[in-house]
Amino acid sequence: MTKKEIQKLIRTLETYCGDKGLRYTPPRRITLEVIAASKRPIGAYDVIEEMGKVTDKPKPTTVYRAIEFLQEHGFIHKIESLSAFVACHAGHNHEGSQFIVCNDCGTVEEVHLCHLPKDLQKKVDNTGFKMAHWNTEIHGTCQQCQA
Amino acid sequence: MTKKEIQKLIRTLETYCGDKGLRYTPPRRITLEVIAASKRPIGAYDVIEEMGKVTDKPKPTTVYRAIEFLQEHGFIHKIESLSAFVACHAGHNHEGSQFIVCNDCGTVEEVHLCHLPKDLQKKVDNTGFKMAHWNTEIHGTCQQCQA
DNA sequence: AATATAATGTTATATTGTTACATACTCAAG
DNA sequence: CTTGAGTATGTAACAATATAACATTATATT
Ligand SMILES: [Zn+2]
Ligand SMILES: [Zn+2]
Ligand SMILES: [Zn+2]
Ligand SMILES: [Zn+2]
């Protein structure tokens, strides 16, 4: 994300917290800034490192708590297959996420769909399952890396 | 899986290795047996524990190597959001996996589709991305656990 | 000020996964 | 046979990721 986009995202976080009676705190702000500023998914311990540049180097707990908060409220997503985090690019909270991950350069693109693909939704319905969240990670090689 | 199904799966592994000039070895066999016998996704260190009941307790490397082999050849899948493994229920190697995961009881059902859902495939095609593998994990509450 | 709630600080530890190097097995060429 | 190449395992140490438990601080409400 560009610096402007990050600034906007941070203001969104601040507003969101105000509206919901949640606290807009340094760990939460900095964690989001760091994740949003990263070109690729960033691991929790790299967030700790980055955060250490602007505050006392935080303990894992601090960052993991901020990550949990930001995930719950839809500001970031975890790329499970990489144990790493990215800022949400959809601009709103959503139940499902899709990512395209390049195995060569590591870049990740969020592909936002508002609904689970029909063929999957059908299968889920047939089992009487009550869906809460879903996530798809598509691995392969991006156009750039094919050249 | 039932004991019969496991036995069949193991024979499939043996045949597969023979056909491909790969080795059918105790770590590979036991790892598959243990994962297939588990009612829920099983973590690598629990596989180590189980394997320890029938051989000298193995080191992590042994089990991780077997897991890697079994994954590469389509016998097992990793549930990324749980860092745990399940035996494949599709009966053949496939590029994409879908799982329905109950957050309450932990049971996982594999939903096999041979192709990526169309809306996702379109998005991928538009980016010029060359897909290798994909994985979807759907979390929620199974019918039993809703009662 | 007293209280309740939300959030953070701190320490230690648990869980998951990898690196590096030595040893053994299998098959085939000489 | 035996030697060499490729495949797989054995072993020890370690790295990376994540959580538990308990103390303290901040914020808002009474
Ligand atoms: Zn998103
Ligand atoms: Zn790439
Ligand atoms: Zn499968
Ligand atoms: Zn359930």
Image: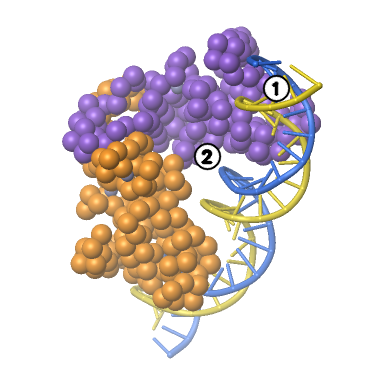
Chain colours: A purple, B orange, C yellow, D blue
Cα separation, mark 2 vs mark 1, equals: 23 Å
Residue B61 location (% of width, % of height): 52, 62
**Relative height, residue C3 to residue B14 (above, below):** above
Give the number of the mark in front: 2 or 1. 1
Mark 2 vs ligand 1: CB below 8 Å: no
Relative to the observer, which residue lies in front, B66 or A32? A32
Residue B82 location (% of width, % of height): 44, 46
Residue pictured at 36% horizontal, 31% vertical? A132
Q: Which mark is residue B41?
A: none
Crowd class of label 1 (few under 14; some 14 to 19; many from 20; radius 10 Å): few
Which kind of residue does numbered mark 1 sit on? Answer: Pro
Asked which quadrant contains residue A33, the reply is top right
Which image quarter holds the C terminus of chain B? top left
**Relative height, residue D17 to residue B71 (above, below):** above
Q: Chain of mark 2?
A: A
Q: On the image, numbered disc 2 is attached to which residue? A: A83
Which kind of residue does numbered mark 2 sit on? Answer: Ser
Q: On the image, numbered disc 1 is attached to which residue? A: A26
Residue pictured at 49% horizontal, 76% vertical? B56
Residue B99 location (% of width, % of height): 31, 41
Q: Report the number of discs.
A: 2
**Relative height, residue B12 to residue A52 (above, below):** below
Q: Secondary structure at mark 1?
A: helix
Horizontal side of A111 relative to A58 (left or right) equals left
Horizontal side of B103 relative to A44 (left or right) equals left
Relative to the observer, which residue lies in front, B77 or B73? B77
Horizontal side of B81 relative to C10 (left or right) equals left
